[in-house]
Amino acid sequence: MSKPCLVCENPIEAFVDYGRMPIANGFLKKEDFPNEYFFRLHAGFCPKCHMVQLLEQPAREQMFHENYAFFSGTSKSMAVHFAGFAEHVLKDFIADSKDPFVVEMGSNDGIMLQNFAAKNIRHLGIEPSANVAKVAVERGIRTLNEFFDEKLARRIVAENGQADAFLAANVTCHIPYIHSIAAGVAILLKPKGVMMFEDPYLGDVIEKTSYDQIYDEHVFVFSLHSVAAAFGRHGLEVVDVEPQTTHGGSMRYILAHKGARPVSERVGALLAKELALGLTKAATFDQFRRNCEKSRDELKALLERCKKEGKRVVGYAATSKSTTVTNYCGITPDLVEFISDTTPIKHGKFSPGVHIPVKPYEDFKARYPDYALLFGWNHAEEIAAKEQDFRKAGGKWILYVPKVHVA
Ligand code: SAH
Ligand code: TMP
Ligand code: ZN
């Protein structure tokens, strides 16, 4: 029996199964190995509304809690990105408002809202993971430590009035109760208000075989087709789209109450492009599965060869995405000695499922390996600039997006 689509309840068609998976951000201590949580990571496509989605997702409290391991502020280029995002909102969407009010869902450590707080603009972050929310509060960013949904939207309106802008980055695709989110946004927005959200884009995932975007938190991989279908049910219309290079290729969607704002020509153009790319056809996803299998087999073979030749391979950046790669490909500590990462809370812990040790960046610098397996490939530019000494010392990068290769 196939499952009903989370958006339209039509039966979904499964197209890829990555097998038994742990929580992607569930970096853990040795004593917690016996209690590690696993679920089945398999994804499907809805032939009716075209939403790509997980068939199973762990409960939200398994993923977002007081020990959430992802701090947005660890990437400098993301801080620059969000400063630009905020500037766009300020200049093009709320400049005319007398007392603008900006709400952000999944505000994490305040990486985006700090730009509004610095200008004394009324703002409110909604962040359920207590540890990251605390960092934001300490930086003077108004934050509610809760999950956003329709009920919370009503409370926010009662306490603050409606919002000019509702922002969300890398969080809307995490939330299976998308109808409650969309209904909440419709309640929260002023008549001319906008919702602006961005998430990894299905077109990039398909084109680059970046299957590591599929993990527990990412219950959806959005396209313009599927976003329009989901939010359209709540009287919200996509009025513009802005492609982003972040997270290996994302799309920013700008929505407003239907009819409230003119629809950009870019919307029609992207819909046509998605049709041409096959994002509405099941056959595209069958080909994607074959591409994943090929990528897995080639990466495993490359790492086995390095091991046979006695080369040292170290993982670079213990990203949440890497959990799908290491577990799907069977990359164990005999193939990758450790993963270097700059986030203190991950140090001394082990990667989810395959249990590769995570060590501070200083360990990488102290003794360069022969190869660095770039799990943070979406930050390749920032990292390459930083790691020129590694290259000069003869070090090489192993990459697997868009194809397995050594650089
Ligand atoms: N916007 C940041 C953080 C993305 S990580 C960035 O792009 O870097 C996703 C964040 O969303 C996590 O901090 C998580 O705790 C939060 N989150 C998950 N479900 C949520 C919900 N229903 N409402 C608000 N935030 C949520
Ligand atoms: P992300 O790809 O989900 O943003 O994950 C970023 C992770 O990568 C985070 O744990 C920090 C780590 N990281 C490094 O260790 N070094 C770096 O130079 C960068 C940019 C990130
Ligand atoms: Zn559907």
Image: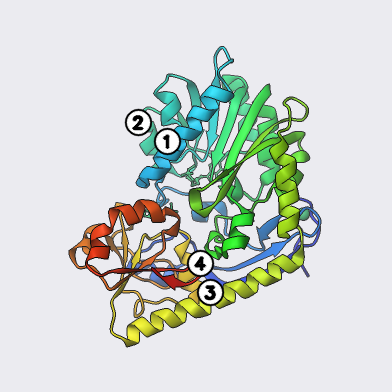
Using a 10 Å C-alpha cutoff, classify the residue at mark 3 as few (fewer than 14 neighbours), some (14 to 19) or many (20 or more). many
**Residue 257 visible, this orientation:** yes
What residue is disc 4 on? Answer: 324
- Considering the numbered disc 2 on the image, is that residue within a helix, a strand or a loop? loop
Q: Cβ–Cβ below 8 Å for labels 1 and 2?
A: yes
Considering only order in the chain, which callout, 2 or 1, is on the residue closer to the N terminus?
1
Task: Tell me residue 172's x, y (percent).
Answer: 60, 45
- Hey, what amino acid is under mark 4? Thr
**Amino acid type of disc 1?**
Gly
Alpha-carbon span between mark 1 and mark 4: 27 Å
Q: How crowded is mark 1: few (under 14 residues within 10 Å), some or many (20 or more)?
A: many
- In the rendered image, the residue lying farthest to the top is 98
Q: Mark 3 points at which residue?
A: 295
* Residue at 36 percent of width and 78 percent of height: 335
Q: In which quarter of the image is residue 97?
A: top right
Tag 1 and tag 4, C-beta contact below 8 Å: no
Q: Where is residue 317 in the image (x, y as percent from the top left)?
A: 36, 59
Q: Which of marks 1 and 4 is nearer the N terminus?
A: 1
Question: In front: 13, or 78?
Answer: 78
